[in-house]
Image (cartoon, grey):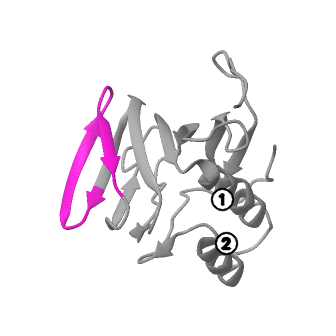
Amino acid sequence: MGQSVLFSAGEGDSVSLRGTEVTFKVKSDQAEGASCTEWVAAPGFDTGLHVHERLEETWYVLDGELEFRVGEETFKAASGACVFVPPHAPHAFANRNTGPAKFLLMMSPPTHDRYFVELAEILGRSGPPDSEAIAALRAKYDTQQLSSLATGTEPQPATR
């Protein structure tokens, strides 16, 4: 059994996905059931449509608004909204607004948080994103990409 963890506001290791910040609140090596990340998504951030075979995800919007597509349905989730997506459901989420959107993302099983660390390393390299490296990363972490990812801003170095 893992140990309890407390991160106050602003605490936790973080990475940048070209301007979208992901802070790790509960990492996969600390949890058996789910990991938890806090996001500040830059305007224009869009995961593109994708699907997971095993991973289920839950978003809780803290500030701003996200646009979701789940299957054929598209809807907006504002502050206080909770969205759950089970395995096998094609989905995408995006920040279509002019300001950042802040939210929690819980993932079960918990290993998917490592995907964001490795993605930040790829996106932190100068030049256009390495599509072959990203495709290999997606395959490694139970993600079948159905449309393109957009980060919304220019490359920034990956941090931990």
Image quarter hosting the C terminus: top right
Q: Is residue 136 above or below residue 115?
A: below
Point out residue 21 in the picture as x, y percentages from the top left corner. Answer: 63, 42
Give the residue number, with chain letter if any, for mark 2: 137
Q: Secondary structure at mark 1?
A: helix
Q: Is residue 64 above or below residue 111?
A: above
Q: How many marks?
A: 2
Q: Quadrant of residue 134?
A: bottom right
Q: Residue furthest front?
A: 1
Magenta stretch?
Answer: 69-86
Q: Image point 69% across, 48% down: which residue?
A: 16
| Residue 113 lies in the magenta-colored region | no
Q: Confirm or deny contact between disc 2 and disc 1 (CB under 8 A).
A: yes
Q: Image point 76% across, 35% down: which residue?
A: 13
Whichever of callouts 2 and 1 sits on the residue coming sooner in the sequence is: 1
Q: Which mark is residue 115?
A: 1
